[in-house]
Structure formats: C-alpha cells, structure tokens
Amino acid sequence: MADYIELSVPVSDAEQSEILIAELVEFPFESFQQEETILKAYIREDELEKCRDDVAGFLTGRLLRGTYTRIETVNWNAEWESSFEPVDVDGKCLIRAPFHEKAADGCMDVVIMPKMSFGTGHHATTWLMTSAILGRDFSGKRGLDMGSGTGVLAIVAVLRGAAHVDAVDIDEWSYENCAENIAENGVADKIVPILGDVSAIAGRRYDFVLANINLNILLADMEAYAGSLEVGGVLIMSGILETDIAAISEKAASLGLKPAGQHVKDGWAALEFVK
C-alpha cells in the first residue's frame, strides 16, 4: 500500500481554510484536517510526484508556503483515531467511529472506521448530504453513491429504506474501506462497492444518485448521472462552495434537471434536483 504525504499550510482563519480545501481538491489530495491555524492536506506519495510542481506554483501564486511530511501508512489509523470527531446531524443521525459511544435511542447510528477515505475537513458536506438524505424516503429504491469514499452516504440511504445502492469510487483504499464499513453496519446485502470511475455506471438505472465530490468532477460527470436516473429520480450533489451553486444549477438545467432543494453550511452547499 502506498505511503502518504502530509502538506501543512498556514491559514489565517476557517474561511481561508475552506477556500483552500476547495481549491486543493482539484489536485489528487484525498483528505484534510484543520488544526488551529494550520491546514493539513493528505495525498498519496506517487500522486504527489505527478503534480508537485503544479502544487508549488499554486501555493506561490496565492502567497502561501507549504511544508511536506512523509507519513507511513502503518501510522495513519492511529493518527485519525486521535482526532476523528463524530458527526451529529440534527440529532437524527450520528456518524461515528467504533471507539465512540453509540448514538442515543431514536437516532440513526452509523459506524465508520476513520481511514484515508474519510476527511474531517469535509464534515460540512457529509453533514449536508446526510441531512438531505434524511429528508427523503428511499423505501424500496435503487441508488448510486458516486465517489463513495467510506460508503457513509450509501449506508445512510439504506438505513432510510433503499433496497440497493452501488457505491463507486476510483480509489482502491476507499473501495476496501467501504466494504469494511458496510459489513460493520450490517448492510452488505444491499450495498455493492465498485472500484472505478463514472464509466462503471454505464447502462445502469437508478432512482437516486448521491455525489459528494468536487465542482470540476460534478460538472464533467453530471450528464452521466442524469442519464442513469429514472424519470422522477433525484440527484443530490455536494462538495461545492456556496459560490459554485450557480455553475452547478446552470449545468443541471441544461440537462433537464429541476431544482428540488438547497442546503448550506459553513460556506459549503448541497443541491437537490429531480429528473
């Protein structure tokens, strides 16, 4: 398994950190962690070698400096276990690690092993997507969790009644972690992890599509998402800033998707559309 590199960048405040995260995801950074005035971004060592000069140019262009530290995979889980915090969605759903206390009675309990595919920097988008899923009845429906990472959204969708969810991610680590998490939550019979990109859904049909990725990928792949939806199907997307809402909405409109909901939190946004 590949080792990871930690990029540490000093930031002035949370707003600058959020903007920086949104820009760094254009490179192959997978996870982020905020520690007071330092933003830490994590990337596979082999991926960094392909874009190191571009990242340096990006930081220089924004008058930022970064420091790289090599983190061996063997130490990674302990790193996350020491800092991973549960995500409480309106008291209706608790996304937690196995070492946290179980959710209270009446609250959906989702157990996620915190590994590379789960980044604390994107808790806002996880929260937004989860909130949107909780607001819908997926009973008996078939869905797609695109860019599934840990599989958390697929798990929540099944706990909201979905009969089947394909969980697709291009990253092998995420694929393996997703399989681990769906087994931990007792939903392995309803969620199928798939290693691949958007081409993996060719010819498949869904009642709903969940995509918590980033602006460029959403814009590039939205046509495929829309094409896979049944008429009346729902597309829920996040991983974007509030400033990206217009671009996403314009693309969705061009594909015949109708607005069905908008949610914002800490500068991030989640948008719902119906085919």
Image (tube, rainbow, N blue to C red):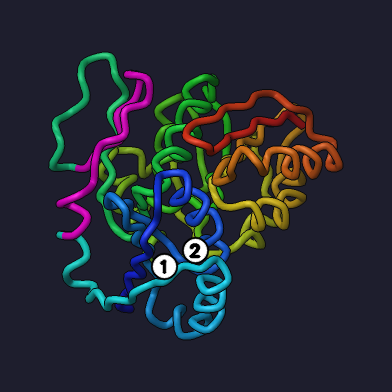
The residue closer to the viewer here, 121 or 176, is: 121
The answer, for residue 176, to whether it is visible in the render is no
Mark 1 sits on what residue?
172
Q: Is residue 107 above or below residue 3?
A: above
Kind of residue at disc 2: Leu
Check residue 195 in the rendering and tell me which mark sits there, or answer none: 2
Q: Which residues are magenta?
A: 79-97
Disc 2 from disc 1: Cα separation: 7 Å
Rendered location of residue 221, percent (x, y)? 70, 55
Q: Magenta includes 81?
A: yes
In front here: 19 or 128? 19
Residue 201, image x, y percentages: 64, 55
Q: Nearer the viewer, residue 65 or 18?
A: 65
Q: For the point 24% across and 72% down, which residue is it?
A: 73
Q: Is residue 226 left or right of residue 63?
A: right
Looking at the picture, how far across and down is residue 124, in whole percent?
44, 38
Can residue 159 be seen? yes
Furthest-top residue in this view: 106
x 42%, y 71%: residue: 65
Q: In the visual, does 45 lie left or right of 140?
A: left
User: Which element is circle 2 on?
Assistant: strand
Quadrant containing the C terminus is top right
N-terminal label among 2 and 1: 1
Q: Which quadrant: the N terminus?
A: bottom left
What secondary structure is marked by label 1? helix
Quarter of the image where one finds residue 11:
bottom left
Which residue type does callout 1 highlight?
Answer: Glu
- Residue in view at x 66 percent, y 57 percent: 216
